[in-house]
Image: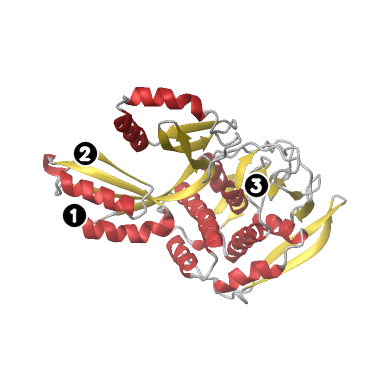
Amino acid sequence: MLAVLDCPTGLAGNMLLAALLDLGLSQTVIEEPLAALGLAGRYRLICEQRHSAGLRGLHLEVEPLEQQPMHRHWHALRSLLEQAPLAEPLRQRTQQVFELLAQAEAAVHGMAAEQVHFHEVGAIDALVDVVGVCAGLLHLGVEQVICTPPPAGHGQVRSAHGLLPLPAPAVLEIARRCAVPLASSETFPPAELTTPTGLALMACWASHFGPMPSLVPSRVGIGLGTRDLDRPNLLRLVLAEAGAGVATTPAAELQTVVVQQAQIDDATAEDLAHLAETLRQAGALDVFSQAIAMKKGRQGVLLTALTSPDLAGPLRQVWWQHGTSIGLRESSQQRWALQRQSSTLETPLGPVRLKWVRLPDGCWRSKVEHDDLQALAACHGLSLAQVRARLEPLLNEAHPDAAQRPHG
């Protein structure tokens, strides 16, 4: 399922959630994961059919019911999300959005992401919006989201930190980190049009930002904003079946990775190699080292491992068991990953494994596993260059857009 979000007057979490409910999404889909997070009875959803400049839509307000709202740091919220009995895809999507929000707020306030207060990534309404939108999109089977560039607004907005300039600092930081294009707000009256929560949701969900592609709409949901503008204040969530007249551009996926690092000057080269290989076997996405100069002129190594957030804990145990460092630095970063697949190609010389990457222009790029090249070269008494020359004509016939599609 493809979802296209048209947001001509901006983007906010409650507008996104309202559009999903306008599509017919049951409130139960939203309320069940929120109850799993212990939020049952702490909020109320107020949904109303309204009109904005003559156009109908659904308006949603999240009313907090907490008499004394809790002030959680990001690390406490992350722990809550990790321990709650949520479906894994929902947990990962929700963590990704809040991680981006925390990183953006930390950057603009000059603090560590772990110390960002809950009110700085949104109060309970942000939890409802983020969990609700992610749960709704997953429930509808949305596999790809395309979002039109939203206007961010101009002027000033009052926040917990006083008056802030618009676009909101966190909105600009998210747009910078994720290369999100922001439409001009020149013709709008002074107002906040795009919120950090709304933009973080789309930065994590949208495959790319641009005009609506050619498609046959199957369903349309309208979410209304609260502010009165000189035009309809709404966003439209359009659903279309993938492949049903849809013309989309492949793009990279925004992912969150955990970076683990240690500076080591008291281990042998053999021990370092063993630690690096054990980290890879434990699921690290990548492990690499750099030579560094440490205190007292000692030569050392900076060992770095990249991992998905869910494997950060198990990998720490590998560091403690097989490494000599008494400390480990961790940070979360965003990375863009191109679509990738793998396949096995049968050749006259023997089978070889291929890795495929789809570029933003739709073309595929392949790479043969080097171990397989070496094995074929040794088996047939050929050089690596000779093996590559014989395989190259066969690669064009094996790419994913040809009849023989890879499995991934």
Residue 291: % across, % down? 22, 38
Mark 1: few, some, or many residues within 10 Å (few <14, many ≥20)? Answer: some
Left or right of residue 342: residue 189:
right
Q: Are marks 2 and 1 in contact (CB under 8 Å)?
A: no
Mark 2 → mark 1, Cα distance in angstroms: 16 Å
User: Taking 382 as reference, is 309 above or below it?
Assistant: below
Q: Are marks 3 and 2 in contact (CB under 8 Å)?
A: no
Depth check: 299 or 379 in front? 379
Residue 270: % across, % down: 17, 46
> Which residue is disc 1 drawn over?
324
Nearest the viewer among 109 and 273 is: 273
Q: Amino acid at mark 1?
A: Thr
Checking the image for residue 292, the label placed there is: 2
Which labelled disc corresponds to residue 83? Answer: none
Residues marked 3 and 1 touching at CB (< 8 Å): no
Residue depicted at 88% across the width and 51% down the height: 54
Name the residue type under label 2: Ile
Observer able to see residue 326: no
Marks 3/1: CA–CA distance: 45 Å
- Amino acid at the residue labelled 3: Val
